[in-house]
Image (spheres, helix red, strand yellow):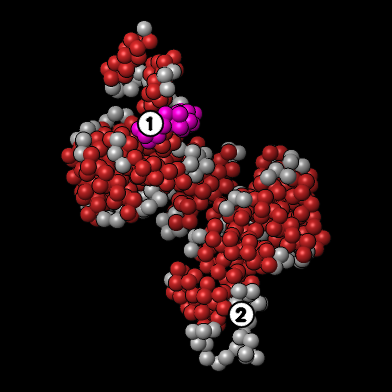
Amino acid sequence: MKIYYMMRCFAVFAISIAVGCATIALDQAPAPRKTAAKPPAYYGPENQYYYFTAAQVQRKKGNLDKAIVLLRKAIELDPDSSYLQRELATIYLQNKEGAKAITVLEEVLRKYPNDIKALIIYGGTKQVGKENKDAIAAYEKILALDPKQQRVYSLLGNLYVEAGDYTRARATFRRLIENFPRSYAGHFYLGRIYAKQGNVKDAEREYKKALELVPDRPEPRFELINLYKNQGKTTKIIRLYEDILRSNPNNIRAAIELGFYYQQQGMNQEAQQILLNLGLRSQNEFEVIITVIQLYIDPKKNEDALVVVRGMLKGLPDSPDLNHLAGIAYYGLKKNDRAIGHFKKVTPQSRFFQDAVVHVAFILQEKGENEEAIRFLNAAIEKDPQNPDFKYYLGTFYEEVGDFESAEKFIRQAIEKEPDNPRYFFRLGVVYDKGKKKQASMDAMRKVIALDPKHANALNYLGYTYADLGQNLDEAERLIKEALKYKPNDGYITDSLGWVYYKKGQFGKALEYLKKAVELVPDDPIMLEHMGDAYHKLNDRPNALKYYRKSLNIKDKEALEEKIRKLKHEGS
C-alpha cells in the first residue's frame, strides 16, 4: 500500500475518531435553558435538544440537508456549544460540502482554539483536501496540547514524508515511539523513511522491530522483501513469503508475488505449481483477479502481468476473467492481434464482457477498421441486447464514419434504457452538432447540464456555441466561467472564454485568455486561428500572420488562406 494512500485513509480516520462518539455522548452537550436545572423531560420545539435529536434522526435516514437545517436551529438556541458546531461540520463533510465544514470549524477554533476534537476534524479535512500546510499546523498543535494523541503522529509524520521533509518525519515517529514504546506504526513508518533514503541497515532494523511487536503483520515482511530484492538475497526473500503464507494461507498477494519470483529465478516447477493453483482459485475467488490488477495491470507492468496470467491460464485456459487480463496486458504492449484473441474469449457471463467488447472495438478503430468495429459491436448487442453502453459505443462508431443518422439512432436507444445518463446526452449533442442540427445540439447540452450542473464540457459546449453564433454572449460568458470552475486548466475552455470576449469586442481581454489557452494546448489549429483573429483586430498584422500560418493545417484551409491573403493586402 502506498504511503499517500495510507495517509488519506488515516486522514479520514482522523475525522472519524473525532466524531465517532457523536451518537453516544455529548462532551459539550447543548446547555439547558437557564430556567431549568436539567434537560426537560419533554423536548419541545423551543429546545435545542429537540432540534439536535431531530437532526440525528434525519441524518440516520440520509436526509442530510434536513439534518443541517435542524442542527443550525439548535445552534441558534445554544451558539456557544462547540459540540453542536462540530456535529454540523461533520454533517457538512458527509454531505460533501467541505468548504462549509471548514467555515464552521474555523469559527469553533476561533472561540475554542484548544478544542482537540475540532482540530482533529479540521486537520483531517484539510489533509483530504490536499491543504497539507494547514493540516500539519493543526496536527502539531494537537500534539503540543496532548502528546498522547497516538494516531495523530502517523498523520503528521506521513504528511512530512509526502512533503519530502524526512528530518521532521523521522522526529515525529521517534516522538511517537517515545510516548508509546510499543508502537508498531512508529517503527514501521521509520523503516519506510530509512528505506526511501537508501539506509538499508536502519530500515531493516525498524521493520524487524515492528515484527517483534506484531508478529503476524505481513506489511513489514513485504517491505523487507523489497529491501532484499535489491540485494539479491533469494533465500531470505523466499523464506519471508513462506512466513506470510504460513501465517495466512489466503494471502493472495504473497502467493502471486512468490509465483512470479520463482519464475524470475528460473524455478519453473515451483512457479507453475503456485500459478496453476491461483488460476483454479480465480474461478471462485475474485480477489485473485483483483490482486493481479492491483499488482500488475493498474501500474502497467504488462510484461510481469503476462508472466503471472499465462501461468494461471495453464490451469484454466478458457477463464473469461484471466483472458481479459491477458488481453489488457497485450494491449498495453501494443500487441493488438494477441489482445483481440484473448478479449474474444471473454463471455457475456463475465463481469468484464463489456470492457472486453469495447477494447476490441477500439482496437479495430485504431487499425482503421471502423466497419469491422461496427459489425463486432452489432454482434455484441445480439449477445447482450439490454446493454445500453454497447448501443452508445455503436453510435459513436457510426459518428466516426460520418453516418450521423445511425449514430443518433443508437445513442437514442441507449438513452431509452438510461434516460438520466448525461454522458449519452452529451454525445447525442455532439452528433447533432456534426450533423448541422445546431438547435437540437444545444437542447441536448441543456439536458446534460440539467442532469449534471457540473458537467464542464457541456457548459463549455453550449457557451462556445452561443459565442460562435454571436448570441446570448453574457450567458455564454457565465456558462464558460462556470465550466472553468471545474476544469480551471483546460485549454479548450480557456479558449472559449477568450472567444466570448472576442465576440464582445473586448479584443485585449480576449487575447489574454487566448494566449493562456495556446500555452495549455500549443498545437490546436482553431486556437491558433483565434489568436490570429485577435491580433488582427488589434492591428498587429505580423503576429496575426504568424498565427494564421501556424494554423494552416486546419480542415478549412481555403477560408484561412483567404484571411491571410486579405491581411497581406491590407498591409500593402
Is residue 501 one of those drawn in magenta? Answer: yes
Q: From the viewer's side, name the closer residue of 514 and 76.
A: 76
- Residue 108 occupies quadrant: bottom right
**In the depicted structure, whether residue 62 falls above or below residue 183:** below
Q: Residue at x 32, y 29 (%)?
A: 367
Q: Quadrant of the C terminus?
A: top left
Q: Residue at x 22, y 44 (%)?
A: 440
Q: Which mark is residue 30?
A: 2
Is residue 534 one of those drawn in magenta? Answer: no
Left or right: residue 309 versus residue 402 is right
On the image, the x and y values in percent for residue 326 come to 42, 42
The residue beneath circle 1 is 505
Residue type at numbered disc 2: Pro
Main SS of the magenta part reads helix
- Residue 526 occupies quadrant: top left
Q: From the viewer's side, name the closer residue of 494 and 138.
A: 494
Crowding at label 1, few (<14), some or many (≥20) Cα neighbours within 10 Å? Answer: few
On the image, the x and y values in percent for residue 560 come to 31, 19
Q: Which mark is residue 277?
A: none
Residue type at numbered disc 1: Gly
Crowding at label 2, few (<14), some or many (≥20) Cα neighbours within 10 Å? Answer: many
Circle nearer the N terminus (2, 1): 2
Helix, strand or loop under label 1: loop
Q: Residue at x 39, y 41 (%)?
A: 477
Q: What stretch of residues is rendered in magenta?
A: 500-520
On the image, the x and y values in percent for residue 501 come to 40, 34
Q: Residue at x 77, y 66 (%)?
A: 146
The residues tagged by marks 2 and 1 sit, at their Cα atoms, a distance apart of 59 Å
Q: Residue furthest top?
A: 572
Helix, strand or loop under label 2: loop
